[in-house]
Image (cartoon, rainbow, N blue to C red):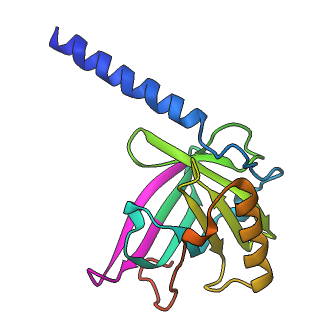
Amino acid sequence: MKNRIILIVLISFGLLNNLASCSSMPEKAQPVNQFDVNRYLGTWYEIARFDYRFEKDLDNAMAQYSLNADGSVKVVNSGYNFKKEKWVSVDGTAKFRGDKNTAALKVSFFGPFYAGYNVVALEDYKYALVAGKNLDYLWILSREKTLPDNVKQLFISKAQEIGYDTSKLIWVKQDKKSPFNK
């Protein structure tokens, strides 16, 4: 009986996770088509984000993407926690939710639980606007530690069209060299 209850709980969590993965993007967001994951691989600096608990108090945040043998994407997120005065890093995995030419992925840092990662604007694979699973998650990324003003304005306008309150963006300091940057 006990094993049966555990099995029911595990199946329920799996079903809930699958349902959450289906709605992994804000309603007005559209992922980039003709996406080339190989061009997206490498290091991206976080220029701005909505603050949330996993990145709380982080500056110098960055993400590094590489391909795993199974075709999924290895994700290494890191940053400097300025309150604890130490570098932190977490590894994860991203998988396409469908067509590999569409920048709609799901990412997990905690076992079987995935959240949306959707590239909704991309400028020459140098700058990216990434929408999360809902309007609480947004990132502006750059291959460099800075972002041109014209791209900044373009991405802010795009985010507002989707429904984001861009006044909530936190502009991330990029003033230290990361020990995780390969």
Q: Quadrant of the N terminus?
A: top left
The answer to which image quadrant residue 142 occupies is bottom right
**66 falls in the magenta region:** no
- Residue 107: x and y, percent? 52, 49
The quarter holding residue 14 reads: top left
Q: Residue furthest left?
A: 2
Of residues 5 and 65, the one nearer the viewer is 5
Residue shown at 63%/71% (left/top)?
141
55 up-or-down from 17: above or below: below
Q: Which residues are magenta?
A: 77-94
Q: Is residue 143 left or right of residue 4?
A: right
| Residue that sits furthest to the top in the current view | 1
Q: What is the chief secondary structure element of the magenta stretch?
A: strand
Residue 30 image point, x, y percent = 76, 48
Q: Specify the farthest residue to the bottom.
A: 175
Q: Is residue 20 depicted above or below 38 in this figure?
A: above
| 91 shown above or below 148 | above
* Relative image position of residue 165 (x, y in whole percent): 62, 63
> How many labels sit on residues?
0
Q: Is residue 166 left or right of residue 79?
A: right
Looking at the image, which residue is at 65% across and 86% down? 146
| Residue nearer the viewer, 4 or 42 | 4
Relative to 69, is 34 on the left or the right?
A: right
Whether residue 26 is situated above or below residue 44 in the rendered picture: above
Percent x, y of residue 29: 72, 49
| Left or right: 159 in relation to 90 | right
